[in-house]
Image: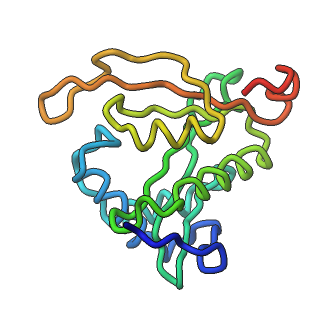
Amino acid sequence: MHERTSSERLQMRMARPDDAAAVARIYNEGIEDRRATFQTTLQSAADLEQQIAGVGEYPFLVAESDGTVVGWAAVKRYSDFPPYRPVVEAMLYVARAERGRGIGTRLLEALVDEAESAGFTKLIGKIFTDNPPSIALVRRRGFREVGVHHRHGRLDGNWKDVLLVERLLGEAAQESGGAR
């Protein structure tokens, strides 16, 4: 059983380009695990450094414990269509050895806050239906299940279903009477 990570030791902050190697390591664990992404090509620090440096208006956070990056969360543009620009897609990965310690919860809470502060009105997420820990996390954090994209893509030759979730932010949440 994992020891809980203390709030004093776990810090959420915006990612910096020098975090790219740690972010790539964590993302590559997720790619290798085949439970969270259709991506099959491992990513280099250079790939992620460009993504972190080019984020601008899109929050990209890391969770740091005792000086070590143990997780990351970011949002990316959902669509170029003007009415959809305030909608962003969330991504979240926690280092394999650190899972089950509440880091994902803290990262998602911080990402929701940052996305809302940046003026986004909705976070969406796409989760493999056979990933119960991630589904449980978004349910606990107020995301609503929208539906399932059946046979959304193939991973290693096998069809994967994807659960679509959303959480309203800012004025969209306020104008919905508090519904998320």
Q: Considering depth in this image, is 133 or 148 the residue closer to the camera? A: 133
Residue at the far left in the pictured view: 157
Residue at x 69% of width, y 24% of height: 82
Residue at the far front in the pictured view: 1
Q: Considering depth in this image, is 57 or 31 the residue closer to the camera? A: 31
Residue 171: x, y in percent? 86, 30
Residue 135: x, y in percent? 46, 36
Q: Is residue 76 left or right of residue 26?
A: right
Residue at x 72% of width, y 27% of height: 180
Q: Give the answer, above or below, for where 95 lies relative to 121.
A: below
Quarter of the image with the N terminus is bottom left
Residue at x 64% of width, y 54% of height: 59
Residue 31: x, y in percent? 27, 50
Q: Give the answer, above or below, for where 177 lies relative to 62.
A: above
Quadrant of the image occupied by residue 165: top right
Q: Considering depth in this image, is 58 or 93 the residue closer to the camera? A: 93
Residue at the far bottom in the pictured view: 66
Q: Is residue 171 left or right of residue 179?
A: right
Its colouring scheme is rainbow
Q: Give the answer, above or below, for where 52 lies relative to 82.
A: below
Q: Is residue 174 left or right of residue 71?
A: right
Q: Considering depth in this image, is 46 or 121 the residue closer to the camera? A: 121
Residue 161: x, y in percent? 32, 23
